[in-house]
Every structure is written in C-alpha cells, then in structure tokens.
Amino acid sequence: MPTCEIVKNVYYVGVDDRKTRFFEGIWPIPNGISYNAYLIVDQKVALIEGGVKIDYARPFLNNISSVVDISRIDYIVVNHMEPDHTGTLPILYELAPDSKIVTTALGKKMLADFYGIDDPNRIIVVKDNDKINLGGKEIQFFTIPGVHWPETMATYEISQKILFSGDAFGTFGALGGKLFDDEIDLEFYLREGRRYFANIVGMYTGPVQNALRKLGSLEIKIIAPSHGPIWRSNPEMIINLYDKLSKYKSDDKVLIVYGTMYGFTEELANYIARKLISEGIKVMVHNAVNVHPSFTLSEAWDSKVILFGLPTYDGGAFPPVYYTAYLISAKKLKNKIFGIFGSSGWSGRGYAKIVELLKSIGWKLVEPIVEIRGRCKKEDLEKADELIKNVVDLIKH
C-alpha cells in the first residue's frame, strides 16, 4: 500500500494484509485487512499507532522512510497495544532512539509485559484531555477503555479535526489503494464493518456507548481508524453504524441457522424459510456446516429472531450449530428472540444445551419447539406452521 497525504502534513503509512486467513486466529478475512498508521510531520514528528503486525515490518518501515527519516520521529503514539498495532514497535524503538512512546497507564505496563520496554525516560503516560504540541499542530488524548481492550485511547488532531480512533470505527477488508470513504464500495465496507463490530468489539457495547458520548463533544471532520477506510466525506456513517450496533437495534429480519447430516433438518429449514418469505418477512439462511460463525454472528446482531435448526448428535447438539450458538452467547448479544427446530432418530432433545446457553444471556424462546423423528410428516408441518405464525406475529407487531 503506498503512502498518501490525507491532509497537509498528515500521511497514511499503513499496509494491507492479504495473507492472514483468520484475524485473531478465529475470524475469517477472505478479503484481507488493513493495518493503518499515520504520520504527522511538523516541527515535531508523531507516528500515530505504534506500528503494524510484525509480518509487514519491511513495507511499513519503507512507507515511513518515504515521508521522513525514521530517526526523526519524536513521538510514537500507542492508541492500542494489540500486536497487530504494535508488532513493529520494538524496531521503531531502536531506529528512532530519541522518540518517546505515548500511552495510557495500563499501556505502559503492557509495554513492559509485551516487549520489555520500560525506560521511564522514553514513556509518556497520558490521560483524558492531555495534549502534546507538535508545532503548528496539536494532538489531544481521550481514553476509551474497553474498545476493545482496557488500555485503549483515541488521539485527536485539533487543527484538522482528525480523530485517530484505533479499533473503534474499524472494518475488515484490505484497502487496495482506495483509502477514503468516497473511493470505496461503501456497501462492502459497511457490511464488513458490521462483521468487525460483531466479532471484535461487540462484547463491549457499554464501553462503545461511553466512548461515543465522550468523543461526541468533538468536532470531527475525519475519522482515521486502525483498520479499514478513512472516513472523510461522511464520518457520521460509521459513527451511526457503531451507535446502532452497540444499542442492539434490530431490523425486522429472521436468521435461520441450521445444520444437517442427511437432509431432514434442511428440509424443515427450507420449509420455514419459504413460509416466512411468503409472509413478507426478510429471511437469511445459514448452513452452520459451511458458513463460519463470524458471518452468522454478524447477521444475528441486527436480526430480531434467530431460529436454530439441528439434529441430535451423539445425544447432544449438532456441533457446528452448537459452536455458533456458543460464540453468540460468548459475545453476550442481547435483546433477541430465538426458536428451535430439528430432527432426531430416537433420543431427541439435542437442542437442550443451546436453549440453556441462549436463555443464560436473556434471550426469549418462541414456542413451539419443533422436533421431528426422521422425515418431516404432516403433523410436523402443522407444528412448524404454528412456530411460523408466532414468528410472523413477533415481526409484524
């Protein structure tokens, strides 16, 4: 990814990653991800973000060097300590020997824990509203703990009104040279922004709302996150998305998540989907065997009703569906209604653990539970119709 001057004397020096298959070792990124970093060149030089993932040290350092000699860096601002932001920090620490690292109090402890960096003469601990003057430009700091680690902060460049937001307002997806919201496929990046939120930030909705309130007093012309596009034309678009998702606002949508071994549960899933669609309901259908929970979690986030379909397997829940339900419960997604359908050969009730999981995070069960023995028979469809009717009533009323 080449460097780019965002505004006068503020440069993008980040990189694209199209090699990593799973972000954090869990979440698939088939379209890659960007690791964004920024240079402010004034009488003093500040690097915003402590670096990038170590795998991309060479292109990252080359990007910085194309703008300014690395040894000239005065401040390395660490908004967030996660190694996809700070992997190259030990290298920068050596190449810019006069630089100071700017971080929060907890960030200082993590510098020692992660990288053995603990020289008090080279670490500046900042708190809310602290400022550093760079000459013509001035940067100000705001702690936003829990978005999504407890040491996190955001950095605000006052003269150009740029918010360097760290993981907040980020998205999946490499940039491919298109840095700004007026250059990209908005539909794609907003969809990947929703998935990024659900997968990475979503467990911390309270801290997100706290951050939105704290940063809401700022005049923000540009949002420059550490992943995804820079929002210069319509920063409110990504702010509004994060606000909606962190308030658990649902659309009138049903998500069907199912797994099947021999087709019985799939037949019932297709029947339910078709009936709901015929009632004018928006429906998404995910086969948990083939669709990674990352995408299902994202769809579940703004669905009003989620229906789980599964066969009983070894006396318990079919593992791919159970894993999806487990990740949803682990992220503590709130304010949802769920239903259960599925099949068994003899014992049945393989869904019981899923019901327990989802009730533990406050989800409400819509009756009836529809479980068939083997193939789907007339009386089974009548019971499924009752479930469908109750779901339609919940969506439309």
Image (spheres, rainbow, N blue to C red):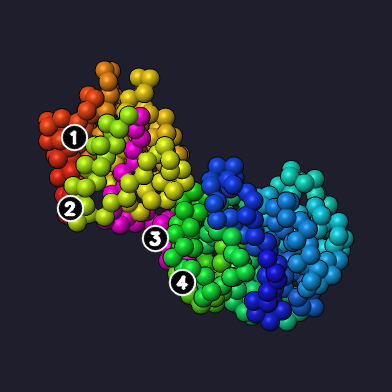
Asked if the residue under mark 2 is in contact with the one under mark 1, i.e. CB atoms within 8 Å, the reply is no
Q: Which of marks 3 and 4 is nearer the N terminus?
A: 4
Q: Which of marks 1 and 2 is nearer the N terminus?
A: 2
Asked if the residue under mark 4 is in contact with the one under mark 1, i.e. CB atoms within 8 Å, the reply is no
Q: Residue at x 25, y 42 (%)?
A: 270
Q: Within 10 Å of the Cα at label 1, are there few (<14), some (14-19), or many (20+) other Cα atoms?
A: some
Q: Name the kind of residue labelled 2 in the image.
A: Ser
Reading the image, the residue beneath label 1 is 368
Q: Within 10 Å of the Cα at label 4, are there few (<14), some (14-19), or many (20+) other Cα atoms?
A: some
Give the alpha-carbon distance from disc 3 to disc 4, as whole Å: 12 Å
Give the alpha-carbon distance from disc 3 to disc 1, as whole Å: 31 Å
Q: Quadrant of residue 36?
A: bottom right
Q: Can you say which quadrant of the picture contains the C terminus? A: bottom left
Q: Residue 236 carries which label?
A: 4
Foreground tag (1 vs 4):
1
Magenta-drawn stretch contains 246:
yes
Q: Residue at x 65, y 60 (%)?
A: 16
